[in-house]
Structure formats: structure tokens, C-alpha cells
Amino acid sequence: MTEIDTSPHAIVNENLRQVGKNKPRNDAPTKVYGRAVYAGDFHMDGMLYAKVLHSDRACANIRGIDTLAAKALGGVHAVLTSQDLPANNAVMTDLPGQVGGGTKDTKQPILAGDRVRFHGEPIALVAAESYELAQQALELIVVDYEDTEGVFDAFEAQEPDAANVYGDDNIVAAYKIRKGDIDKGFAEADYVLENTFSSQYQEQAFLEPEAAVAWIDEHDILNIRSSTQVVEHFRAVADALGMPHNKVHLQAPYVGGGFGGKEVMTIEVWLALLAMATQRPVKLVQTRENSFISHGPRHPFTFTHKTGISKSGKITAMKITVTSDAGAYAKLSPYILLYATVGATGPYRVDNLWVDSTSAATNNLPTCAYRGFGTMQANTACEAQMEELAKLIGMDSLELRRQNFIKTGDPNTTGQIIRSAVWSDQCATQALDALGERPDNTDTLLYGHGLACYQQSYGRIRWMKDTSESWVGLEVDGTAIVRCSVTDIGAGQMSALAQIAGEVLGIPMSEVTVYFGDGHMNPLGGTSTASRALYMTGKATELAAKNVRNNLLQCMAKHFDVSPGELDLGESKVFVIDDPGRSMSIKDMVKHCASLGVHRHSLEIYRAPPSEGLDPETGQGEVFPDFTYGAHAASVSVDVDTGEVTVIKSVGAHDVGQAINLRAVEGQIEGSALMGQGFALSEELILEKGVLTNGSFSEYLIPTSEDVPDIQSIVLESRSGLGPFGSKGIGEPVFAPVAASIVNAVADAIGTRIHHLPLTPEKVLAAMTAKKAAAEE
Amino acid sequence: MLPPFELSQPTTLPEALSALAAGDGQPYAGGTILVPDLRGGREKCRRFISLAGLEELRFIGHDDEGTTLGACTTIADIAKDPEMAIAAPALAAAADVFAGAMVRSVATIGGNICCGSPSADMVPALLTLGAEVTLSNSEGKRKIPLSAFYADYKKSVLKPGELLTAVSWKPLRQSASHLFFKLARRKGDAITVTGVSVMMAANDGKCSKVRIALGSVAPTVFRASQAEDMLRGRALTAELIEKAAKAAADQCSPIDDSRASAAYRLQTAQALVRRQLTQAWHQASSV
Ligand SMILES: Cc1cc2nc3c(=O)[nH]c(=O)nc-3n(C[C@H](O)[C@H](O)[C@H](O)COP(=O)(O)OP(=O)(O)OC[C@H]3O[C@@H](n4cnc5c(N)ncnc54)[C@H](O)[C@@H]3O)c2cc1C
């Protein structure tokens, strides 16, 4: 058993042979040559095709559902409504894959019964011989709706006479932080500034829509091969169907992007029900239109910041209220709100702090996990406020940040002491420097530079008691195998494990085969969410590989007549460090050790540092294992006649602890530069009375290849993280400051700030026009 | 879901025209409007005649008489044509900012003209070139000015059985300025919010020729004729340009939609006309 290690890792300066280098990922060839098999690529004999009837309105009673005609259609094998489901008709939508408890009860009906609460709520499932027949059957289903009054605004939802969506009062979750003395803090301030910032819905827009095939095999096991971030959903599927957990086998092949949208269960339980009802394999690949309404987008948030600050730039107090729109079901809203609450002060130390946060239910789309998970929205607001504070007191905004950055050893918002390195200053300085000189404005273009820093957790909420397991073994030919159920959602999760095991065992990553994404054949690695996959599964793999290494080195020490510490593994050899001529190939070494019965395999578990939750009155306690810090800087131009914003340069500088694969890190930074740009400038789901009006890629505008700016990645390595080799999580962190930096750059260019995102040309032009009008008065 | 549909594939123009005359369906060129419309349930027709096999409609011809484009010339063909930057700079510019690389490589100029959309990006530059379109049917063909082609929102004077086979224009005067600006909510694959094209030639310090066309700010792309009239024969000043821009905006009748408000369209139409006239005057009068 491994000790739970909560201390900061020593800065080791290990001599790394492949970790941290630019290595082609193990999954690159199969993806580049188009051989990789995704969930929607599977075909089975006798397979049926599914379609789902989604509600076309946001709130209505269902007086009846007539499925007779649909059932009578030739080639249709099943039409299921809530009446055909197991009595509880509910599926867990809470943080998945946890065994440690601490989760809330946030069950959601699998199919709507007597009421629909949001546009897109599933009502009926069909399985037929073809998609066309299934579609025809859907069109024959008659739902007798009775429209009811709904509520579509998170503030209105909290009014006493608001239509009821959830619980007694539409309050899905609420938190508070009470720290220090804010009255005293405001009394000490030279200036007090209050601002409200709000942000919009954002769609994950993964390349691969939800896709899965479910079938029952010859052992009566229900198998599901799905595009998911979480193979541990097998438990929730089993619970929903009233089956034992060991009779549901969930596999994830390569996943074409998740970004949080495939964290909560998507289509798995529907296919499970249809496969059970028809006893045939059933497949569903969601259309893009249905994908838009069948997983939860990013929460719209509103933050009101009241900040006290001294003339010298020291924050003396912060009072922040946070409101998010949870939509019709809770899903992960309570946790996302918690992240926003903890992250409300960004990467700054604030000793006098008051935060109140609420997530309210509405009849809008249920919102859920999306890269950044509430912290990103909180950070965007906080970094806007920092710029406004700098402007107010006439100080350079980086200098103001420097006055307030949280440091190693400081308590954060919840009183947790930060143990790892905090290189906010270095990152911010380097990112800003990389932008170069700001060009002079022209008659038609205004130029601006913007900066944003952040603090983003990696690893899951500690009272969930997250664990990860991995198995590493050496074959007698000197190649290695890693078994870990981690899902590969495109960020290189699988390849990173090969690299880590290869590093520890002294062989190239190309000689390590990783079996991944299978929750029954492999040890459970846990979810690819919360920037935890590399941290947790990488750590478990590192530990397991080290066990194997130690076993072999002990055996080889006898052979070379040295102590194990005098040996190293590298370049596919075992050798005496001080006398490298004395060596043996790894292949011969493994053979030798195997003949002596040495254990060449190891199953390890890594346990994240646990905690017992927050004090509900003060919000004090330990929430996350650790945090990543860094900065993003952007330069933009704004067209004075149209308000169009062009991002010219976008620079991410992050302390990643230790890069495992430098190229994969750069990939994350580059992808986040565009995802953040979309959030800042053009992406917004538009709902009218809860009904999504722009659920297509011609109306919902993610950046295209033609919108890509000059992107630069600056990677710093403090080797102070909790992950393998001192790495920190980076998937979400590198995204956290991007939008804020672009928003700040636009404010810099036009000399005024827009408080509600995204910054469409129209809003930017209106802000410039208003500023001009104000100046003329 | 894409509904099933029939697609006949003639290989010669006469074959295609007789199929059209027989009412065998609607022309299908690049399909970049038809396919999304079929999928979205907006297109009810289920029988199409593919123009993809008609190589004779895919050409770019430059000579002393001007330029002619076959209807099946793709936007990428136009963007790649080395002479287009001289023959029609604004059209080349429009091709560059049109959609994204994938769509450009299949979308046709004929489809862009015939779809009748007010946001069709090739049309403003063609209007400021004074282009003519050739409409053919199994009996023969007629040539009409593009400015007379549109009747109303997504309505044209194309008769049943008629195919647009070519678009052509006379050479631009060498010193003329020809500009296009596309305002949209992102750089690639975006529907135009306001599109403006200006063509101007100057003589003796006066504006001798001017055409102004606007897209996405009225039911059809149109020529801002009142503004043109104010400028023709005059030496342009900032004041006059501002007046003309105002006149052009007055001729717009934009709507609110999810991309922009009518007010924003009006404001930017005026600003962009002003900007382009200023730039065009600067270029045309300085040679
Ligand atoms: C992602 C995307 C981005 C886009 N971006 C842009 C853009 O930036 N700017 C822009 O202007 N458009 C854009 N479009 C719309 C479209 O690509 C263009 O209008 C294109 O030029 C249409 O040509 P097509 O050959 O694909 O037409 P099709 O879809 O084949 O046909 C369109 C219509 O025209 C008719 N038609 C076609 N050819 C003829 C002919 N020769 N004679 C008579 N009738 C004919 C068809 O019957 C049909 O009704 C975009 C479309 C997509 C899908």
C-alpha cells in the first residue's frame, strides 16, 4: 500500500529521458491515418438503430403519449416511454465514478413522465431496423402537451412567486465564505469599486457527437461501447436498470472530444433500455441538432464584485455574490457553483472576504460540466475587476496583480494552505513580454493588449476521496503493458501513460502498449474530468512502474553485485551508473529475472489527499488537492466602424509542474486559445423562453480555422505538482485565463468595458458609440 | 436527417436543359445550400439535376471584351485565378473571405447568384462590375443585367426550365478602384451581416463612374443608386461622401435577426459605404 502523500513534492531535478520532451503521441498514427475506431464506427450483426424523441418545448404537462402508430410501423422493434421503464425511472447525474461518498442526490428522470421541464428533455426512445424507420416512428408519436408557465431567469427563479422547477424554492445549491472582517477591510480601503459581470451559455461543440452501441452478450452481460469520459457510469446504468454492477460492462474507445459534455451520462442508459427491450444490439449516433439539446452547456453566471483597495494597490476586502443558472435539473450545478465560489478571488490572496453564491433552477437547458467548471467564469469576472481596479487607482495592472498574488504557504479563499509553487508573476511577465510592442492605432483600427492570470484546481473535490488504479507489467521480450481504464478523450491520456511507464522502465514509449477505456478488463483509473486524468492515472502508473522497476533492480543488483541504488534503467538497458559499460539489455534482464520468479507486474492505487468538507457557515476547509497557476495574454485590433475584434496574438504561459509530453501540453494551450476566443467573442446559445434558437454550427459560432491567431505556448516547470514527476493538471487550467485576456485586450483597445459576454461586433460598436457620446457631453 | 432524394446526372448542357424542361427537378450545383436546407427541412423538392458533370459550365475566360465565368465555376476557382485580382479585385476579395476552404471548393458562382440570398457574397462585387447573366433553356438563351435578375427576397426572374449558364462583365477601367468588405461575426464560414462593394473611376479630378452595392441589408442585394447619383461627375469631399453614405443607408431596409439588429446593420452600412468611397476615391483619383 502506498502512503497518502499530502506534502509538497521535493524539486527533484531527475534526469528525464523522454518525459517533458516533444514526442509523437502513441495514438497519433492511428488517428492521422484514419484507422482509429470511434464509438459510432462499430457495427454488429442484427443491429438496430435508435432515435430519441426530445421535447420541443421548455415546460409543459404531458397529458398523454400516443405511440400506437409508431409501434405498428414495420421494422420498429421498440418504442419506450416512461411507462415502460423500471419503477424509479431515474438515473444518477451526480459526480460519477466516486466511491468515497459526499455526493448529493441529483437523480433525473430517464424519460419525462407527466411533465417536461426543458427543451430537449427526452420523452420516448425508438429502436428500428434503420435510422430512417426510427425517424419515421418518432414522427408518428403524438405527445399531448399542455403548456405551463415557466421561469427562464436565475434571479426570477428565486422570487417567492416564481414557477416551481426544482425542490421547494428552485435553489439547487448555495455556499458562503466568511473570512476575516470585511467591514474592517472596507474601512481600511482608499477606494471601493463595485461591478457586475455576466457570461453566457457555451456549447462544448465536440467534434464527435454522442455515440454508442449497446448489446447483451452470451454471458448475459450488458455491454455498452460509448463515447464517454467516464467508464464508471456502468454503476449508474446498472442501478437505473436494477441490475448488479458486475453485469454491465462499459467501454470507451477513442473519444472525439468531451470537454465536460460527456462527463455526466449521455445516451448510455437509453441504449441499455433499448437493448434489454429488443435483445438486439442497438446503436445511436446523435445528430448535431439533438446533441445541442442533450448534454448540458456551460452555466451562465453573474458575479457582483465589490472590492476595497488601498492607494498602493493592496486589496483590503472583497464582497462577491455569485449566481448561476442551473436549468431544469441539478446535474453537476452544485459542484460547479462550489468551484466558482472557491475561485471567486482568482489567483489573489484576500484576507477579508465575503462570498454568497446560489445556483437556481429554471426551465432553461440544464447546464453542466464544461472545461473550467465554474472557476473559469469566476476568473473571467475577477480579472475584469482587477483591470478596472488598476485603472481606478492609476496603477499598471500587472503591478497591481503582483501586489496581491497568492503565494506558496498562503491560505486561499477556504483557508487551504497552498503548498505547490505559484509562478503567477513569472508566467504573467513572460506572456505579456511575448506580445511585443503595441502597434499605433490607425483611422480604422484600435489596438489593445490584455492579460489575465488564474488559479485553477486539478483533481477532484477531496471529500469524494478520489482514487485511481493502474497495472504495469513487463513482458519477457522487454516490452511493457499498462492496464488502466482511463478514457482517452483526445488530450493524449493513453499516450501519457506509455511515456510515464517507459520513462520509469527505461524503454521508449513506443514499446509500451496501453489498454485503456475499458472498465471491466482494466483496473479502474477514474474519470477523464477535473484535470485529474494525468494527475491520478499518471501517478498510479508511475507508482506501479516503480514497483516493477524496484523488483527488477533488486534482482539485478545481485547479478552485478552492487546495491540497487547504483543501477539505472535507460536506453533499453540496465546499467551500473558509475560504470555504464557493465550493462544488460532490458530484454535479457526481464528474461533473467523471470527465470528467477521475480514479480514483473504491479497493480497500484493512488489516493488523492482526502478532506472532510467545508464548514457550512464560514466556507473554510480543504476542497482541492492542489492548483495550477499561469497567465494568458492577447493582442487584438478593433474595427472602429464595425466593432469587429480580431485576435492577433494569443500567448499562454503556464507552470505545468512538469510537462509529460511537451507537444501535448502545447496542444492543450493552442486548443484553449481558440475555445476561450470563442467564449470571449462569438459563442452564445440563445434561448427564447427556454427554447434553443441557434442549435446548429451555422448559427452557433465557434472559431474556425480562418479565425486562428498567432498562438504561442510558454511552458514553465516548477516540478512542484502532485502528479507524476511533479506535474500539475493542465487541461482546464490553460483555458481558465484565455477569455479574460481577450476581454481585457478589447477594453484596452476601446477604452471602455463591456460587462456581458460575448463581445459581439454589435456590442463593441455600441460601447464605442456610447463612449463617444459620453465624451461629447 | 438528410431525407432521401433523387439526383440525375446529365453530362452535357443540352441533356441538362431538356431534363429541366421536362420538369425532372431543380438544379443541384455545389449543394452547399441545398444539402443544409434538405437536412433542415426547409427544402421540399426531392428531385434534382446535378450540374457537376457539365464541364462546359466550369470555366473562367478573360479577353478584351471582358471576363466570363461559367455557372459551375467554384469560388475556389475564382480565388485561385491569377488574373482575377486585375479583372475584378472585389470579386477576388469576396472569394477570399467566402465561407471556409471546404465550402469554397464546391460552392459555385451560379449557385451563389441563383440562391437569391441577400447575403450572397459574390453578388455585390458582380453588381458593381455591371455584370450580366446568361439564362439558357432548351430553346435558347437570353442575357440580362444582373441588376434586373432579382425580384424579391429569394425570388428571381429565372423561368421554369431556365438555367443560369454564365455571368460576364466588361473590362474594368484600368485606373478604377473595386472594393468589397464583408462584415460578419467571425472570419470563416459566417453569414454576412453587412456586405459592401464599391467600384469607382475618376477622370479630371472628378468621379466619372461609380457603383455601390450592398448585401444583407435588404430583401435582395441592391445598388445604392441614389448615392451613386450624388457622386457621379463630382469631385468628392468628405462631406459629400458622408451624404452619399447616408443616402445609401436610407435605401436599406434591414431586419433584426440572430446575427445582428437592423439598427446595427444600418449603422455599419453607412460607415462601410463611407469608408469604401473614401478609399476608392483615394485610389481612383491618385492615378
Ligand atoms: C458552411 C457554409 C458557409 C457558407 N458561407 C458562405 C459565404 O461566406 N458567403 C456566401 O455567399 N455563401 C455562403 N454559403 C452559402 C453557399 O455556399 C453559397 O451561396 C454557394 O455559392 C451556393 O452555391 P452551390 O453551388 O453550393 O449552390 P446549390 O446549393 O447547389 O444551389 C443553390 C440554389 O441555386 C440553384 N442553382 C444552382 N446553380 C444554378 C444554376 N446554374 N442555374 C439555376 N439555378 C441554380 C439551386 O437549384 C438551388 O436552389 C455557405 C454555406 C455553407 C454550408
Image (cartoon, rainbow, N blue to C red):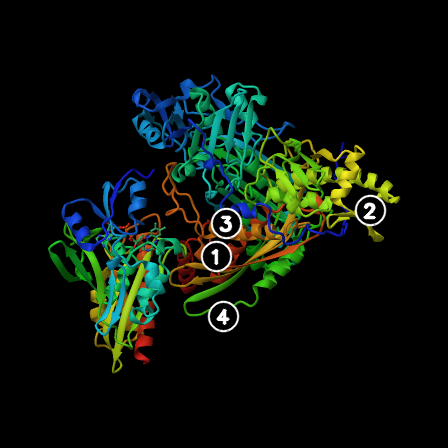
- As shown in the figure, which amino acid type bears the numbered disc 4? Asp
Residue behind mark 3: A675
Q: Is residue B165 above or below residue B83?
A: above
SS for callout 3: helix
Q: Is residue A436 left or right of residue A688?
A: right
> What is the C-alpha distance between the residues marked 4 and 2?
60 Å
Q: Give the mark nearer the N terminus: 4 vs 2.
A: 4
> What is the C-alpha distance between the residues marked 3 and 2?
46 Å
**Disc nearest the viewer among 3 and 2:** 2
Give the percent coordinates (x, y) of residue B247. 24, 64
Query: Can residue A552 be seen?
Result: yes
SS for callout 2: strand
> What is the C-alpha distance between the residues marked 4 and 3?
28 Å
Disc 4: residue Cβ within 8 A of ligand 1's nearest atom? no
- Tell me the residue at 44%/19% (across/down): A85
- As shown in the figure, which amino acid type bears the numbered disc 1? Val
The tag on residue A251 is none
Q: Is residue A492 above or below residue A108?
A: below
Give the percent coordinates (x, y) of residue B34. 28, 46
Q: Quadrant of residue A732?
A: top right
Answer few, some or many: residues within 10 Å of disc 2's Cα (few below 14, many 20 plus, some between 14 and 19).
Answer: many
Residue behind mark 1: A708
> What is the C-alpha distance between the residues marked 3 and 1?
11 Å
Residue behind mark 4: A440
Q: Is residue A82 left or right of residue A592?
A: left
The quadrant the C terminus of chain A occupies is bottom left
**Disc nearest the viewer among 1 and 4:** 1
Q: Give the mark nearer the N terminus: 3 vs 1.
A: 3
Answer few, some or many: residues within 10 Å of disc 4's Cα (few below 14, many 20 plus, some between 14 and 19).
Answer: few
